[in-house]
Image (spheres, grey):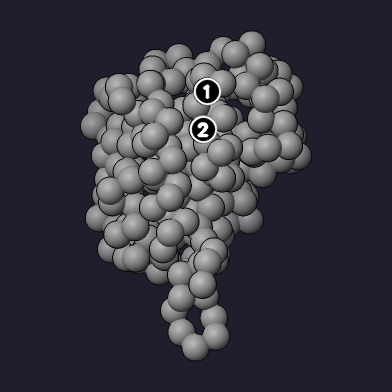
């Protein structure tokens, strides 16, 4: 069978959705579209090597229109920055990767009228349980690895113990991120049954430099299961 992971007599797990994060170049965007990723992530965080300006995001957005969903990634951004990016890049999703509370997330979802995802840094069961507080406030939580103080809050190629979210059945949609690569994503999916996987540095040849072949390999590894 194709398009899913066979788990029994007559039912199959749907193929997980794929987000390729930190896209800065038209060629990388085209590679993600060719590989049938569902989401392209644009990072609006100046300390990141993947940061894009709103003008750069606007150009990428026009290329993405109707071909892949556009996720804007923010870290404790203020309303002005969010509003400028949403308008310029015509974002389809807001991904909040800072200390945003459920109340802040709900406020932004109401203000911008687009889905909001909240990234949660995971190192323990307690961290995973925080997802419950975002139910009703966001459309998806993204379980990601904790990163060392003073480094980026994400995009560090670090993974966490996937057993912590194995077959997670919480009150909100979810996704898996952190250290996922073409070589380990199938194993991560076998262990967790994540409905969405997200990668950034795992498909790069250097920080912020996406590799089209790695993007293709990552997506193939997800879709071939
Ligand atoms: O990707 C970044 O540069 C980044 C910077 C600041 C906050 C979040 C960031 N990325 C968030 C993502 O959604 C990444 O895809 C996720 O953290 C996984 O990254 P990686 O471990 O490099 O695959």
Tell me if I can see residue 217 in this picture. Answer: yes
Residue 8 position (above or below residue 192): below
Counting from the top left corner in percent of width and height, residue 24 is at: 50, 20
Mark linked to residue 31: 2
Disc 2 + disc 1, Cβ < 8 Å:
yes
Asked if ligand 1 lies within 8 A of label 1, the reply is no
Counting from the top left corner in percent of width and height, residue 69 is at: 64, 39
Q: In which quarter of the image is residue 210?
A: top left
Look at 67% across and 18% down and name the residue there.
58
Q: In this view, does 152 lie to the left or right of 89?
A: left
Look at 40% across and 69% down and name the residue there.
167
SS at mark 1 in the image: helix
Q: Is residue 126 left or right of residue 71?
A: left
Tell me if I can see residue 104 in this picture. Answer: no
Residue 164 position (above or below residue 11): above
Circle 1 residue: 27
Counting from the top left corner in percent of width and height, residue 48 is at: 40, 19
Q: Is residue 212 left or right of residue 146?
A: right
Look at 25% across and 28% down and name the residue there.
149
Residue 170 position (above or below residue 91): below
Q: In whole angstroms, how far apart are the C-alphas of marks 2 and 1?
A: 6 Å
Q: Is residue 39 left or right of residue 153?
A: right
SS at mark 2 in the image: helix
Residue 149 position (above or below residue 159): above
Counting from the top left corner in percent of width and height, residue 4 is at: 51, 67
Asked if ligand 1 lies within 8 A of label 2, the reply is no
Look at 35% across and 29% down and name the residue there.
204
């Amino acid at each position: 069978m194709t398009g899913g992971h066979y788990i029994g007599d007559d039912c199959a797990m749907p193929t997980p959705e794929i987000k390729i994060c930190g896209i800065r170049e038209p060629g990388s965007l085209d590679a993600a579209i060719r590989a049938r990723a569902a989401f392209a992530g644009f990072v609006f965080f100046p300390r990141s090597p993947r940061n894009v300006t709103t003008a750069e995001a606007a150009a990428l957005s026009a290329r993405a229109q109707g071909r892949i969903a556009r996720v804007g990634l923010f870290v404790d951004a203020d309303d002005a920055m969010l509003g400028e990016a949403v308008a310029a890049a015509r974002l389809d999703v807001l991904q909040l990767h800072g200390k945003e509370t459920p109340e802040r997330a709900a406020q932004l979802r109401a203000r911008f009228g687009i889905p909001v995802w909240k990234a949660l840094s995971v190192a323990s069961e307690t961290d995973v349980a925080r997802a419950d507080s975002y139910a009703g406030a966001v459309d998806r939580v993204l379980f990601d690895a904790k990163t060392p103080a003073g480094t980026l809050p994400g995009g560090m190629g670090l993974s966490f113990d996937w057993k912590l979210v194995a077959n997670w059945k919480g009150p909100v949609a979810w996704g898996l991120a952190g250290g996922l690569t073409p070589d380990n994503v199938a194993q991560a999916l076998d262990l967790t049954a994540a409905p969405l996987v997200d990668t950034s540095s795992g498909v790069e040849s250097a920080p912020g430099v996406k590799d089209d072949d790695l993007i293709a390999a990552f997506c193939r590894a997800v879709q071939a299961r």
